[in-house]
Amino acid sequence: MKLKSVLLSAHLLAAGLLLASVAQADTLDVRKNAARSSASDLPHRGLTMAQVEKRYGAPVEKLPTRGGDAPRHPPINRWRYDGYTVYFERNRVIHSVVDSGAPPPNT
């Protein structure tokens, strides 16, 4: 009988420790970047390279093309602007990403 009580206590203690470790979490404040990227005028998905360059001007830097070595890996081009980077698949925008810690673009 005493052995059952000890085993039950050990199981409850283990379960309590497991739940306590699961309950820990970090806090991530996404409001700053969400507000910044929604308020900024970034190139949107589907624009061509020519349309982006016409509307936003020449990029600060055109990074080397990645991929393109196989049909399953299309060429990805990256253009850096002041405060954000535009990603192209072949010649179409797939993402525009605000650089961390950068002020919103003034376009």
Image: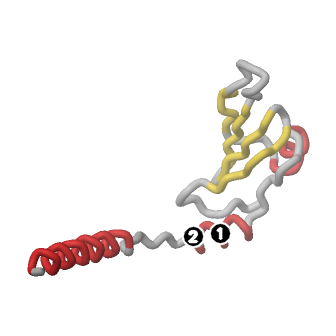
Which of 102/94 is in front? Answer: 94
Pointer 2 with pointer 1, Cβ within 8 A: yes
On the picture, is 91 further left or further right than 4? right
Label 2 packing within 10 angstroms: few (<14), some (14-19), many (20+): few
- Name the residue tied to disc 2: 30
- Residue at the spot x=88%, y=46% of the render? 47
Which of 54/69 is in front? Answer: 69
- Residue at the spot x=77%, y=57% of the render? 42
- Name the residue tied to disc 1: 34
Identify whether 62 is placed above or below 35. above
Identify whether 89 is placed above or below 28. above
**Badge 2 amino acid:** Val
- Residue at the spot x=24%, y=72% of the render? 11
**Tag count:** 2
**Badge 1 amino acid:** Ala
Q: Residue furthest front?
A: 1
Which of 97/84 is in front? Answer: 97
Q: Secondary structure at mark 1?
A: helix
On the picture, is 94 further left or further right than 50? left
